[in-house]
Image (spheres, rainbow, N blue to C red):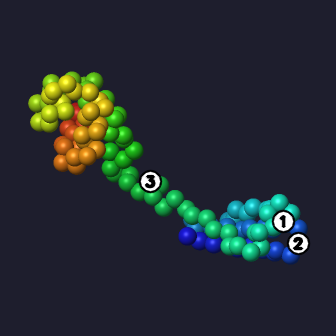
Amino acid sequence: MQIGKVDSCLTSNVSIHLPSTTQPSSVYTPSVTFHLKQFPYLCCMPIEYTRNENLGSQPNNPLHGVKLADILNHLVTELGWKQMANEVNINCFKSNPTINSSLKFLRKTPWAREKVERLYLQIIEE
């Protein structure tokens, strides 16, 4: 977490300059101006902001951003429930299979989810 620098708090306007973490100081620095009449408490509190550090943190993970429901829908479309039950031996694919019941089971059972994710990766690589 970093704190923005407040230029002046004695005038009717407050300018806040947020430090740039990716650009040199000679490049444009974002700033915001507030009217103190609208926000009188600004003088008394630090201005904080956070950067999203995790954005793009898994560029080599093919499962990043793919929902489990999307994985199941893709597998059902490509293979069908019978073939999925042959590949991954779990009861939610064998008896009365539905997307909702499979989602509930896979979210609670990490070993089964890993098998389904591996099967999905095999299918999309082909």
The residue closer to the viewer here, 54 or 97, is 97
- Amino acid type at circle 3 is Gly
SS assignment at label 3: loop
x 28%, y 39%: residue? 104
Label pair 1/2, CB-CB below 8 angstroms: yes
Q: Is residue 46 left or right of residue 80?
A: right
**In this rendering, the label closer to the viewer, 3 or 1:** 1
In whole angstroms, how far apart are the C-alphas of marks 2 and 3?
Answer: 41 Å
* Quadrant showing the C terminus: top left
Q: Is residue 62 above or below residue 99?
A: below
Q: Earlier in the sequence, mark 1 or mark 2?
A: 2
Q: Earlier in the sequence, mark 3 or mark 1?
A: 1
Q: Residues within 10 Å of mark 3 (few under 14, many from 20)?
A: few
Q: Residues within 10 Å of mark 2 (few under 14, many from 20)?
A: few
* Label at residue 36: 1
The image quarter in which residue 85 lies: top left
* Quadrant showing the N terminus: bottom right
In whole angstroms, how far apart are the C-alphas of marks 3 and 1?
Answer: 37 Å
**In this rendering, the label closer to the viewer, 2 or 3:** 2
Mark yes or no: residue 112 visible: yes
In whole angstroms, how far apart are the C-alphas of marks 1 and 2?
Answer: 8 Å
x 25%, y 34%: residue? 102
Residue pointed to by mark 3: 56
**In this rendering, the label closer to the viewer, 1 or 2:** 1
Q: Is residue 40 left or right of residue 80?
A: right
- Place of residue 75 in the rendered image (x, y in percent of width and height, measured from the top left): 25, 30
Q: Is residue 120 left or right of residue 11?
A: left
* Label at residue 11: 2
